[in-house]
Image: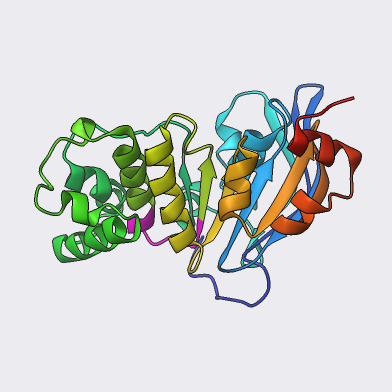
Amino acid sequence: MSGTLPDAGGPVISVQHLSVKARARAILDDINLDFGRSSLTAVIGPSGCGKTTFVRTLNRMAELTPGLTVEGSVLYLGQNIYDTQVNPVMVRRRIGMVFQRPTVFPTSVFENAAFGLRLIHEDEDTIDKRVTEGLQQAGLWEEVKDDLDRAALSLSGGQQQRLCIARALSVQPKVILLDEPCSALDPAATQRVEATMEFLKQNYVLILVTHNVGQAARVSDRIAVLSSGRLIEVGATADVLERPQQAFTEQFITGRFT
C-alpha cells in the first residue's frame, strides 16, 4: 500500500488484538479474526455491539471519526494497515466499502462507476474497460448498458446500491466491506444485491454487516457474532445457526432472550 504488496499466502486480512475506544468507553475489545480468500463472512449482533465500527477499522475509516482510538493490528496480506508509512487512500483502494444507503453522485451512471478511477488518473481506455467490468460483476450491466449517460439518481434504490458496488469494484480491490447494504431496500432489490454478493464471493473477500439473520444464512460462508464489542462466536454459517456454542448466540438468532 506504500508500494506493491506481494500476494502472499495465508489470510487476506488478519485482525489481531483489535480494540477501539471512544475516550474512556470501549467499543471493540481485543478482537482476533482472520478472513480468507474467496469468502463471505457475515458479522451479526444486536444494535450498538460494534459491528459498523469493526468493519470501518478494516480500511481505516474509523480514524475519520473524531475521538476514536484504534489499538492492535489489521494485517492486509501481512502488512499492518495502521503502520505510519501506509497511505490510507491506498488502503481504501484495496479494501473497498459499500454503505448502508447508496451514495451515488449527481452525475451519470458511467461517471459514478468511474469515480475512483478518475481519482487515480487512469487513462480513458482503462476507465472504459473497468467500468464495464465493474457493472457486469455488480449485476447491473444489462440494465444500464444502453444508457450509461443516464442520471444515476434516476435509478431505483437497488440499482443505485449495485452501482456503488460497481464503483468499488472498478479500482480492483481484493476486499469489499458491506455495511448493511440492503437495510434500505425492498425484498426484490435485496434479492438482486444478495445474488451479486454470492457471485462476488467467488473471487473476492466479502465482509458483510447485517442485522438480518436470514440474509446471513442465505449468503455467508461463515458468521462472526459480536456482543458488547467482543467477538463471542465464529464459525461456519450452518454450525453457528444450527448448533450455536454460546447461549447469547442462540438467543440472538432465535429472538428469544431470557
Q: Is residue 172 magenta?
A: yes
Answer yes or no: is residue 195 visible: yes
Question: Which residue corresponds to the image point at 23% horizontal and 56% vertical from the top-left?
Answer: 141
Question: Which residue corresponds to the image point at 37% horizontal and 56% vertical from the top-left?
Answer: 169
* Chosen colour scheme: rainbow
Residue stretch in magenta: 169-175
Determine the image quadrant of residue 36: bottom right
Taking 78 as reference, is 230 left or right? right
Taking 93 as reference, is 234 left or right? right
Taking 229 as reference, is 2 left or right? left
Of 196 and 75, the residue lying toward us: 196
Q: Is residue 256 above or below residue 209?
A: above
Could you tell me residue 121's position as x and y percent?
A: 25, 55
Question: Which residue corresponds to the image point at 41% horizontal and 55% vertical from the top-left?
Answer: 196
Could you tell me residue 55's position as x and y percent?
A: 61, 43
Taking 4 as reference, is 210 left or right? right
Q: Is residue 87 above or below residue 76?
A: above
Question: Which residue corresponds to the image point at 72% horizontal and 35% vertical from the top-left?
Answer: 45
How many discs appear?
Answer: 0
Of 25 and 35, the residue lying toward us: 35
Could you tell me residue 207's position as x and y percent?
A: 58, 51
Q: Is residue 182 above or below residue 4?
A: above
Q: Is residue 228 magenta?
A: no
Quadrant of the rendering where the C terminus is positioned: top right
Answer yes or no: is residue 84 visible: no
Could you tell me residue 198's position as x and y percent?
A: 48, 59
Determine the image quadrant of residue 57: top right
